[in-house]
Image: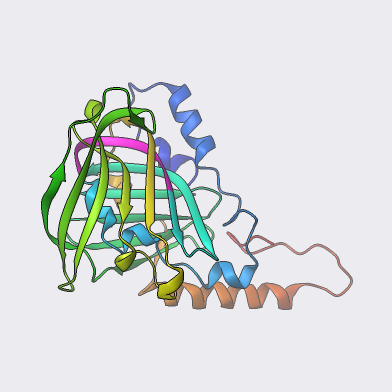
Amino acid sequence: MLTASRFVQIISPGKSRLFASMLLVALAVTGCGAPKKPFIESIMAPEPPVFMTNGAVALLSHPGSWTARLTVRSGSAVRPEVRTGQLFIKGDRIMFAQDKCDRAYIWDNAAHQGLILSDALQGYAPFKSDVYPALLSTKSETAGDPSKSVNGYNGHEAELSALMSDTTEATFKLWKANALDGFPVRVTVPVAVSTNVVLESKIPTVLEITDVKKAEINDSLYLPPDGFTGYASSAAMTSEYMLRHSKTREARPISGEQVEMPAGVRR
């Protein structure tokens, strides 16, 4: 499971049980989406969150090991999308455990590739993005107003110019927290690389990061859990979901009597 033993492993023996318990509550999985998505919509969209495919994840690399809460707002003016979850950052490696969902996402900024983990399927699949900052430079950085804070952190604004791997150019806007050695607690991604929806209705992708804490994270967190099955792609995972769901429907009796569900499959 991605909810209990998996995440307890990241906390060193010296960390408090209370912190670990709070973490597990935050990561409890109850099905994707709020409100809950229909089965077909849920399984046909196993793709990683947009910030892992539009280059924004590159800005989350940070020395040391950290945990934080993340809210991602993206999509379009007519169909906004909000994802929330827990971040686990260790250098260039990022894990995002999404709230109310059976999935977690692992990304390696150095390798420009990652993994989708599915608790319901007890499996994982690789993914990558062809759009990432190939070269970053500071466009502007202003001294912060001591009275101003973002997400509870005093800091200052910065703009970074990025030459993207697809040869396009972009500007990322950040709020860097002074107490976190400049770690960004807000990242705004330009519309040009924000979403795949119709141009007229695009909105910028905004990452809001809160409750940033240092933590000792085991390297094993960024590997597939023991016993998980590897799939060639997210499409292969979708096919497996469909096959299991089809078999489950065929196994249900007309009389309405209860049938034992396959492991990891919820009604």
Residue 215 % position (x, y):
30, 30
Q: How is the image coloured?
A: rainbow
Numbered circles on residues, count: 0
Q: Which residues are magenta?
A: 62-71
Residue at the image position 50 percent from the left and 63 percent from the top: 77
- Residue visible at 38% across and 58% down? 204
Q: Which quadrant: the C terminus?
A: bottom right
Q: Quadrant of residue 151?
A: top left
- Percent x, y of residue 98: 47, 50
Q: Is residue 127 magenta?
A: no
In percent of the image, x 44 and y 26: which residue is there? 19
Would you place residue 177 above or below residue 27 in this image?
Answer: above
Q: Residue furthest right?
A: 255
Left or right? Give the position of 167 relative to 215: left
Residue 63 lies in the magenta stretch: yes
Q: Nearer the viewer, residue 77 or 83?
A: 77
User: Residue 170: percent from the left, percent from the top?
Assistant: 21, 62
For image coordinates 39% across by 71% down, the residue present is 231
Q: Is residue 122 above or below residue 174?
A: below
Question: Left or right: 44 with respect to 173?
Answer: right
Most prominent secondary structure in the magenta stretch? strand
- Residue 103, how many percent across, how many down? 47, 56
Q: Nearer the viewer, residue 48 or 208?
A: 208
Front in this rendered view, residue 150 or 97: 150
Asked which quadrant contains residue 246, the reply is bottom right
| 183 and 121: which is toward the camera | 183
